[in-house]
Image (tube, rainbow, N blue to C red):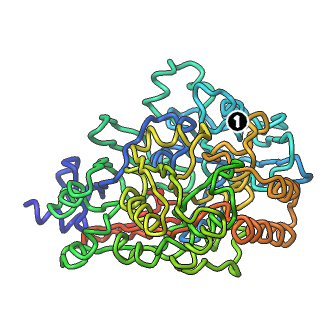
Amino acid sequence: MKSKMAMLLVGLMTLGLLAAAPAAAETSLVAAVDTPPRMMNPHGDDSDAGLSFMANFFDGLLQRKGPDGKLMPALAERWEHPDLLTWRFYLRKGVTFHNGNPFTAQDVKFTFERLKNPEVSEFLNTGKSIDSIRILDDYTVEIKTKKPIPWFANNLHQIFIMDKESTEKRDPGDVMIHPIGTGAYKLVEWVKGSYVRMEANENYWEGAPAIKKVEVRPITEASTRFAALVSGQADIMTGVPVELFDKIQANPKLQVISRPARRSIFLALGNKPGDPWSDIRVRKAMYMAINEDEIIQKVMRGHATPAAQIPDPPTIGYNAAIQRLPYDPEGAKKLLKEAGYENGFEITLTGPNDRYVQDEKIAEAVAKYLAKVGIKVKLDVKPKSIFFPEVAEGKLQFYLIGWFDGTFDMGRTYFKLAHTRDDAAGFGGLNGASYSDPKLDQMLEATADMVDPAQRKKALEELNRYAMEEKIVWIPLHYQEDLYAMQKGKGIVFQPRPDRWIVYKEIGVK
C-alpha cells in the first residue's frame, strides 16, 4: 500500500499527513539541512541559514530568483530612485498576512523602523542608514537615507516585512517563535533541534506553491544527514560533505547537484605598524607560500575553484584582470629575508571549525605551508558562535573567513570588511583585524554616491585592483562549490540558488 501511495504522489515523502484517497493527496517534502534556525524573528538573524528559513514565511519588498539571483518585484510591484537619497516603492495590493491582516504601507514603515532596535535586529546598519520613512498613501511609501546608498534596493530581498498590528500586540517571546508573514508557507510546528513543519499558503499572492507540506530537519552532523537521505527519511539534503561526494554519486538511487558557489574563502590580515605582516613583502610572501591548488585537490577533493579576489563574477566590482600570485615558497623565503624576517615570526591564525566546507582542515593546511617558509603559526579554531563575535571586536591578527555579498555590490563588501573601523559611521564592522588604509577608504567613500552603473563598475574594479595587487588586503584562497543531493526518480525539480537559500515555493514537482 505504501509503495502504491508513493507512486501516486510522484515519490515524495508523505510525513503521514496524506488523505486516504489519491485525488485528495498532497505533495510533501522532507529536507535534511545542515544548519538549524536560531529564531523566527526575521530581523534577528542575518546569516544565510537563518534567512533561508525566513524566506519561506515572509516576503521582502523585492526578491531574488533564478540561478543568477535576478532582483525582481515582490511586495513592491515597482520602485523609483528619483534622487540620491530617495527610494519610492509602489506596493502590491490585495496581499494578506497569514493571520488575515491586509498588507499596507504601515507595515513597511513599521518594519524599517524596527531594524534600528538592537534588541530585535541584526540589520542595524540598514536601520540606522534611514533618515525618514513617509507614507504617501496606503500603497506608496517613500524612504530617505541619510547618505547615498547605491545598493539599497539590492538588499531588500532579505529585509522581510512584518505585520505591524500583530507584532506590536504579541509578547516579544511569541514573535521569536511564531512567524506571521505574507510568505508562501505558514508555520505549523517548530520543535527546536528536531524539525520545522510548514504548509502551503493557498492564498499566496504569487500563487499557491506546488509542494503543500514541508518538513525541514536540521541535522548538523554530515554523516547523519547522509544516512537520512540514503534511508529515504529525507528527499533532499543540503551541505553534502566533499568526502562523501563520490559515495553519493555512486549510489544509483541518489542524484548530486552542484553549482559554483558565490562564497569566497580567504585569509584576512591586519596591518598595525610594527607587525611583520604590515610589510607588503611579508604579505606577498605569505600569499606565495600557500599551495592553493593542493588545498583544492586534497582538502576540498576538487570541489572548489581558485580565487584571486573576494567578489565573485556576478558582483559589481569583480575584476577579471586580477591574477593570483603564483605558489612559490622559495620566492616567499626571499621576500621574508628582504623584509628582515629570514628566521620568520610567530602569528596566530583564528578561524571557525563549523561554518565553511573543510574550514578547520584549510586552516591546518595554511599553517603547514607557512611553517615551510619559517612562519610559526598558532592555530586557534573554534565554533562559529565564538569566532564571529571576535571578528566583530576587531582584535584578531590573522583569520580565515568566507564571504559573498547579498547585494551583488562590492562596495558594500569593502565598507564592511576593509574600511577603517568606524562604529559611529557603521564602517568596518566585520574588519576583524582592524586593517586600515587611508587611500582605500578615500577610494571607497568616493563610490558612495555613484549610481551610474558603468561609472560605478569602473571605480569599484579599480578599487579592487588596488586592494588586491598593491596592498594585498586579503589572501584569497578559493570559491566554494555548493553541493546538494536528492532522491532520484521522485519528481522533484530543484535548482540551487546563488545564496544557498532553500525557498520551497521554487521547488517543483513533475
The residue singled out by tag 1 in the image is 112
Q: Position of residue 52 (x, y in %)?
A: 47, 51
Residue 415 in the image: above or below residue 118: below
Q: Quadrant of residue 245?
A: bottom left
User: On the rendered structure, is 120 left or right of 107?
Assistant: left
Q: Position of residue 203 (x, y in %)?
A: 50, 47
For the point 18% across and 78% down, the residue is: 252
For the point 29% across and 42% down, the residue is: 195
User: On the rendered structure, is 463 left or right of 56?
Assistant: right
* Residue 134 in view in this figure: no
For the point 34% across and 52% down, the residue is: 34
Q: Nearer the viewer, residue 4 or 217?
A: 217
Q: Quadrant of residue 110?
A: top right
Q: Nearer the viewer, residue 470 or 442?
A: 470
Q: Nearer the viewer, residue 426 or 182?
A: 426
Q: Position of residue 457 (x, y in %)?
A: 79, 70
For the point 64% across and 39% down, the residue is: 123
User: On the rendered structure, is 251 left or right of 66?
Assistant: left
User: On the rendered structure, is 161 left or right of 12?
Assistant: right
Q: Position of residue 503 (x, y in %)?
A: 46, 56
Mark 1 falls on what kind of element? helix
In this view, which residue lies farthest toward the right?
83
* Residue 374 in view in this figure: yes
Is the C terminus in the top left, top right, bottom left or bottom right quadrant? bottom left
Instruction: Classify mark 1: residues with Cα within 10 Å, few (<14), some (14-19) or many (20+).
Output: many
Residue 251 in the image: above or below residue 396: below
Residue 296 in the image: above or below residue 189: below
Q: How many marks?
A: 1
